[in-house]
Amino acid sequence: MPRRSMRNRTDAFTLIELLTVVAIISLLISILMPSLSRARDQAKSVHCLARLKEFGNAIAAYENVYNDQLPPAMWVRTNMVNGDEVVLGNYSWAEILWAYIYKETLYYEEYLPVLRNTHPERFEEYFICKAASKRGTSSGHYRVYLPAWSAASYTVGPDGKMPADSRGDPWASISRSSIRPRLPIMGDANQDSAAGHPCQDPSLMTSFIDAGQANEAGLTGRDGNRFSDRHYGGTNYLYGDLHAKWDTKLRERLAVDWDFNGVEDIEISSE
């Protein structure tokens, strides 16, 4: 009887052996976690690029109907009621592309229902990058870059440069074939992209990134309406030829020369 009890004790794990195994497993987990985190971030970046490409396909479908014209960055739906024109809703390029992708028209009597995230259960998965933190209406939606997207003219100061508050007409549109090849038409917006703009109602500033906002802080003093470097310190962009690409320096270059014509357009604030 004592001999069997002794054999059972020698077959069992000692406390030191158990702690050694736990320590080895913890060490392996600590080694693998950074690699798993990088793989997860890479997957989000690849998914984001694929989503931008889907937007490009929707743009191409829209152009087939509207003679190579991009949809407007913003548009207003109206109707005649008793002889008066009544505004039924203010929308953006996002509602147009949704209609072409899903063959479903979106009509809400509110400002920019997709890009202000007023119906997250419906649009959040499609229009918000997976790497963005979801924070109400400022949650990292994709934004179009207005200088490439619209046929707007920008104010140039006496010194030949554009002031930081220059802006174009988001209700205008332009032919995609006229966009400079290296100029992006869409990209990741930052999580404070509803921060507003000194020249326009902040509630409307959730559809596009203007020239003066390409690298400027918004009214909150944080990021404002500019692109976001949320993917490994860079931004995912959709370009005029509808290819998607990651870039680390483009945001800063756009902030100085918004149309890539070799002229420094914008006086960058030192604040």
Image: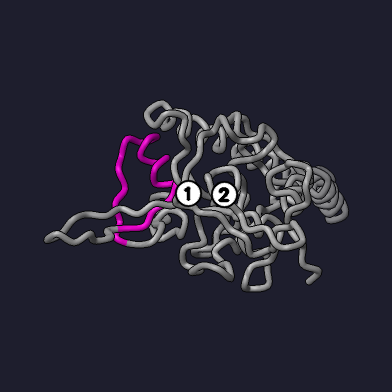
- Residue type highlighted by circle 2: Leu
Q: x and y percent of residue 31 in the render?
A: 83, 45
Going by the numbered disc 1, the residue's amino acid type is Ala
Q: Residue furthest top?
A: 64
**Is residue 201 visible to us here?**
yes
**What is the distance, in whole Å, between disc 1 and disc 2 at their CAs?**
7 Å
Q: Would you name the residue on which mark 1 appears?
A: 73
Residue lying at 62% horizontally and 30% vertically, measured from the top left: 243
Q: Which residues are magenta?
A: 89-109
The numbered disc on residue 45 is none
Q: Residue 173 in the image: state x and y as whole percent.
A: 47, 43
Among the 4 quarters of the image, the one containing residue 224: bottom right
Q: Name the residue located 54 percent from the left edge and 37 percent from the top edge.
A: 51
Task: Residue 5: tell me if it is visible.
Answer: no
> Mark 2 highlights which residue?
146
Q: Badge 1: few (under 14), some or many (20 or more) residues near its Cα, within 10 Å?
A: many
Image quadrant assignment for residue 154: bottom right
In which quadrant of the rendered image does the C terminus lie?
bottom right
- Would you say 121 lies left or right of 46 here? left
* Foreground residue among 154 and 90: 154
The first of marks 1 and 2 along the sequence is 1
Color encoding of the figure: one colour
Q: Is residue 44 above or below residue 227?
A: above
The reply to whether the magenta stretch includes residue 242 is: no
Residue drawn 36% across the image and 36% down it: 102
Secondary structure, mark 1, is loop
